[in-house]
Amino acid sequence: MKAWKQRTAWLCLILIVLWFALVSSSYAAPPLKATERAKSIPPAPPLQATTPSNYVTRVFTDVHGMQMTYYLFIPINRNPQKKYPLVLLLHGGDERANVNNPPDQNRNVLLNQDYVKVWGPGIPGQSTPGVQTQYPTFVVVPQVDNPQHWVDVPTSQGSYTLAAHPTDSLRMAKEIVDALLKQYPGIDPYRLYITGLSMGGYGTWDAIERWPDYFAAAAPLAGAGDPSKATRLVNLPIWAFHGSGDGGVPVSGSRDMVQAIKFAGGHPRYTEYASAGHEIWAQVYSTPAFFSWLFSQHSSYPRPGSAHRLVRPATPTLLKTLQKWLGSLLKSIETWSAISLRTIQKWFGSLLKSLETWSAILLRALKTWSGGSFKSLGTWFASLLKMLETRFGGIPKILERWLDSSLRILVAWLGSLLKVVETWVGGPLRTVNVWFSSFLKLIEIWFNTLLRLLETWVGL
């Protein structure tokens, strides 16, 4: 018995240790982000005015030694006491870098685009105030090397299924933002925005579906995403744009995403330009209401932080484990119940058939047997009656005598019982009667007194 108790104690101890291990692993601190292990970007330049025509060219190197060129616009005459937003701009497919071209040529291919200029130095000759004049902001524009993409799907495909991991280009774009947040304390971690067009529109949808809490707002232009992941975006401010006559990226790409988010409970904005083609950036990036909306968005999530690491298989929490276990258990019970019901149904059907067969055989046997038995019983009962009549003068006389005696005994017994009950109940009934009469008199006196008091009070 003692050995049994020891084994039980050891088993309980092992179960407790396993349970604590499961819980602690569910809430374990997140692993270090890639940028915390990556090589650092060169130190930030000293505080100085940035010329309105310049993006700063940088090269980012990740932990695997992969490099990515990006262009950074720093707010002009930035105040070290202020916080500035940051915009991550993802370019289209035609602006990718050619590894065989000199760096300056690749830079010009991207930075000479008006949709890039509008975020930084501004478009020459434009009458309206530039973005930096109204909303001073950091702007980072990573450049993808051809033939890579932000998302590994053809731009003409439309909606797609999110891959398990981001492309290296999209991953490094996010790591660049992570590194800039560390390098420049003046970047507001609560005001990180992402926008992109065409291939960059795909990248914008892909990024926010992978890291839905990282950005404060998103503006994908002429892009597409994975509608099945729309539940991740219900709380993110999104303003999507597309041309109804887009021949490059199907307009269904934006429609599918917006419809899926709304169905999941979100409230995205969507502008579809009637009869517009693929090039819609000029309409979007020249709308004051768009910039006003974008720069008014603030996130409630701190950055950089554990909530913004790259998407990776999450450690299942205890609740999720129990949920999966219960789901499997219910499915097993459902399957077992269905099999059991079918088995019981078959067994009961066979039992009924057996009972039916057995009953038919029994009835036939009884019928055969009863043919002679009933005659024997009739002869035996007639003989019995004759014997009783000869001995006692017939059955009627016997019954009469027995009933007369029984009635006399019953009358005598009931008379005695009534006398006992009368003697026993008479006293308590008289006592209750006296007590109840006194109680009624007391209530009458009390009620009359109460009425007089009320009469006196009302009269006053």
Image: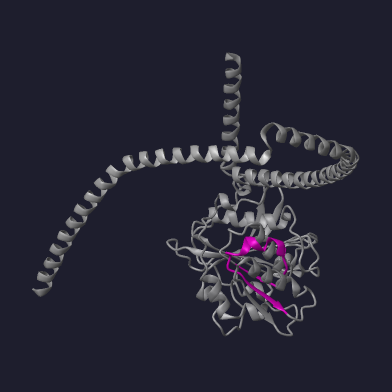
On the question of residue 284 being in view, the answer is yes
Front-lying residue, 15 or 133? 15
Looking at the image, residue 447 sits to the left or right of residue 280; the answer is: left
Task: In the rendered view, tell whether residue 43 sits above or below residue 412.
Answer: below
Residue ID at (67%, 48%) = 312
Task: In the rendered view, tell whether residue 117 sits above or below residue 302.
Answer: below
The quadrant of the rendering that contains the C terminus is bottom left
Residue ID at (73%, 56%) = 167
On the question of residue 222 being in view, the answer is no
- In the displayed orientation, state which residue is furthest to the top: 2
Task: In the rendered view, tell whether residue 422 sits above or below residue 194.
Answer: above
Query: In the rendering, at what x and y percent does residue 162 appear?
Result: 74, 58
Looking at the image, residue 70 sits to the left or right of residue 429; the answer is: right
Q: Is residue 144 magenta?
A: no
Residue ID at (89%, 42%) = 367
Looking at the image, residue 383 sits to the left or right of residue 115; the answer is: right
Q: Is residue 231 magenta?
A: yes
Front-lying residue, 166 or 17? 17
Front-lying residue, 385 or 215? 385
Quarter where residue 8 is shown = top right
The quadrant of the rendering that contains the N terminus is top right
First to last magenta residue range: 218-243
Query: In the rendering, at what x and y percent does residue 330 appear?
Result: 70, 46
Looking at the image, residue 154 sits to the left or right of residue 416; the answer is: right
Query: In the rendering, at what x and y percent does residue 161 appear?
Result: 76, 60
